[in-house]
Image (tube, rainbow, N blue to C red):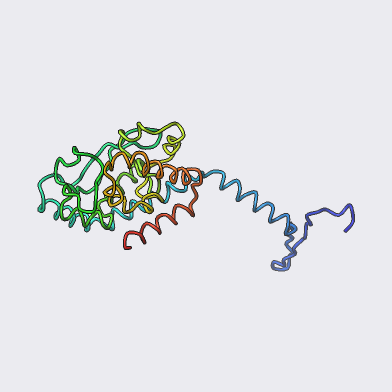
Amino acid sequence: MSALEPKNKIVPNCVPQQGNVAVSVKAVIPQNEANRIIDIIKEDVLALFSIDDVIRLFDVIISLFGLIIFLPLFLVIAFIIKISSHGPVIFAQKRVGKYDTDFILYKFRTMYAGSAQQGSLTIGKHDNRITSIGHFLRRYKLDELPQLYNVLKTEMSMVGPRPEVRKYVNLYNNAEKEILRVKPGITDYASILFRNENELLALHSEPEKHYIEKVMRAKIRINKKYANNRTLKNYFIIIFRTAISVFK
């Protein structure tokens, strides 16, 4: 190629049109140059969306779809709760969310009315504060379904550290408060690993002390790893593993 020859060739394209010759000009760009341009465009597009934006999109899709699909199940659960024990269908409790702000978390009520005042931890596999239908709902995590509404309201994400009550968050040190930089979630790695937490606490003479000193600290360490490495891949892996753990 001559030094004077342009890098991107201009090639005339002659097309006959009813006796006349129409000449169009077409630029031929080298493949490596075309790939470089495509990569630049991709980077510019991706730069417009943060991981928060992408996860929020999937949160809205999944929560909205879930609320619609599970509506009949919601009604059945609500009816059984109402006829099986006295009290409201929905249990609402103040929890701590992103940036250390409080919000109201919703669950299907699984305990007898007023039981939460005796403590926020459930101890053992057969805590006598839990109703008969409550045991079933907790076993298959169905009591958490109303939190799809929290997700839709942007208070929670499908995946993120489980939100604690203020009582326990006040015990966090500065390093542990890092997990409050992300939205709390319906599920996380810690929830999967500690799915038998109630039975674990029952093995100790002072279950709340053990929870604060051991279990809570371990959960925070696990959740910090997710908070510092939030990717769409991890998001869906946690959702998938949670679904599998429910039926184990």
Position in image of residue 23 (x %, y %)? 74, 60
Position in image of residue 2 (x %, y %)? 90, 56
Looking at the rendering, in which quadrant would you find the C terminus? Answer: bottom left
Q: Is residue 165 left or right of residue 109?
A: right
Which of the two residues, 108 or 192, is positioned nearer the viewer here? 192
| Residue at image point 28% right, 58% down | 69
| Residue at image point 15% right, 55% down | 132
Looking at the rendering, in which quadrant would you find the N terminus? Answer: bottom right
Which of the two residues, 62 or 200, is positioned nearer the viewer here? 200
Residue 217: quarter of image = top left
| Residue at image point 70% right, 56% down | 34
Which of the two residues, 19 or 9, is positioned nearer the viewer here? 9
| Residue at image point 38% right, 53% down | 193
Position in image of residue 25 (x %, y %)? 74, 57
Q: Is residue 1 above or below residue 116?
A: below
Position in image of residue 81 (x %, y %)? 15, 52
- Give the number of callouts: 0
Q: Is residue 141 above or below residue 174?
A: below
